[in-house]
Amino acid sequence: MSSKSPAGRSGSEKKRWDALDDLRGIAVLAMIPVNVAAPFSAIPAWFKHAPANGLAFADFILPCFLFSLGLSASFSFGARVREKGFARTLLHAFIRYAVLFAFGTIGMLLVDHSSRWEILQMLGATGLFSFFFMLLPPWFRLGAAALMLSCVEILRPLGLGTLINGWYDSGLGGPWGTFSLSFLIIVASVLGELIRDADARKRLMYASGFAGAMIVAGLAAAIFLPFSKHLLSLSYILFTGGVSAAVLALLVAITEMWKGSLGFVRSVGRNPLILYMLHAVLGVLALTVAGADAVAIGAWGACAIVMAVCIVAAWALDAKKLYVRL
């Protein structure tokens, strides 16, 4: 793969950016056991989301995935507009994100029998909302995203915080979390445009720069606003976004500068939607068979089995070059 144009075309075949597939793969591989483990009482707290303020391993997964979504959008938006025009690109985006939202809503009603805000609903809402920011040039887009996040924090004590808190158990802020979470997609899309046609050294430099700036900003914000995934605090959004950019920088170094490979991780990252739906079904089956009160070995075993099945499925689909895009 040419490092010069990760989103370019060779003939009719679209090239892939290995570091992006790896970033998405890491997020999905972390997500699978965390989600499967969540209902089991024997799984220790450190493997689950922080119940209140604070950060746990699981709290980094969603920002990392949203960051990869923004990077991917930056590669596809311009090419699609040039080929299909803006109207058809908008229609494509609307249908794509509406389908994601519908899948999430139907799945929650069928499986959970509740009105909770589900991950696919969130992806549909944030994806469509972030789409319109793509019309702005990169640095203006970054400024608009920063202004939006500032408005969220200004409005939080005026009532927005209460609305977000009303969806506390979802861990996603409900519909009101769309704005804060979209910030991660928008910022990643800016980074994507800056490094899309750059060489490996510049990609590493830009990704590291974004990582450093966001981590420092997040740590500074944490002095006044504690890390909270459930409330999507400013410190949480900035810090986890910075960590996601740092992981990307590391992957650029591994795959492009050191010519290394993470093996099957890349295959997992190429079919996130299929694996999300597969692991959700398998997770329900595992919980039904083992029971929420299963002993530790049973709970961890369920996670391992679901993980293994998903990895094999990802490898098989990648071998046949069958991809279902988000």
Image (cartoon, rainbow, N blue to C red):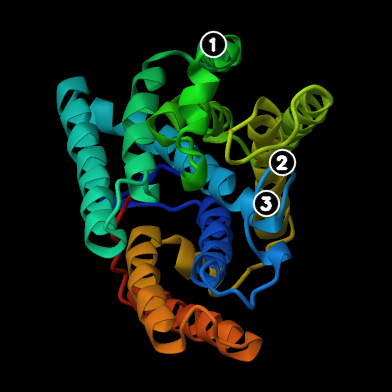
Residue for point 55% across, 86% down: 294
- The kind of residue tagged 3 is Ala
Left or right, 5 with respect to 132, comes to right
Residue 55 position, x and y percent, is: 73, 47
Alpha-carbon span between mark 3 and mark 2: 7 Å
Residue for point 41% across, 74% down: 283
Q: Earlier in the sequence, mark 1 or mark 2?
A: 2
Q: From this viewpoint, is residue 137 visible?
A: yes
- The kind of residue tagged 2 is Asn
Residue 240 position, x and y percent, is: 67, 40
Residue 93, by quadrant, is top left
Q: Residues within 10 Å of mark 2 (few under 14, many from 20)?
A: some
Q: Earlier in the sequence, mark 1 or mark 3?
A: 3
Q: Which mark is residue 155?
A: 1
Q: Choose between 180 and 312: the one closer to the eye.
A: 180
Question: Which element is circle 2 on?
Answer: loop
Q: Residues within 10 Å of mark 1 (few under 14, many from 20)?
A: few
The reply to whether the C-beta atoms of the residues labelled 1 and 3 are less than 8 Å apart is no
| 145 vs 320: above or below | above
Q: Choose between 280 and 323: the one closer to the eye.
A: 280
Residue 273, by quadrant, is bottom left
Q: How many marks?
A: 3
Q: Which residue is mark 3?
A: 50
| 204 vs 187: above or below | below
- The kind of residue tagged 1 is Leu
Q: Choose between 65 and 104: the one closer to the eye.
A: 104
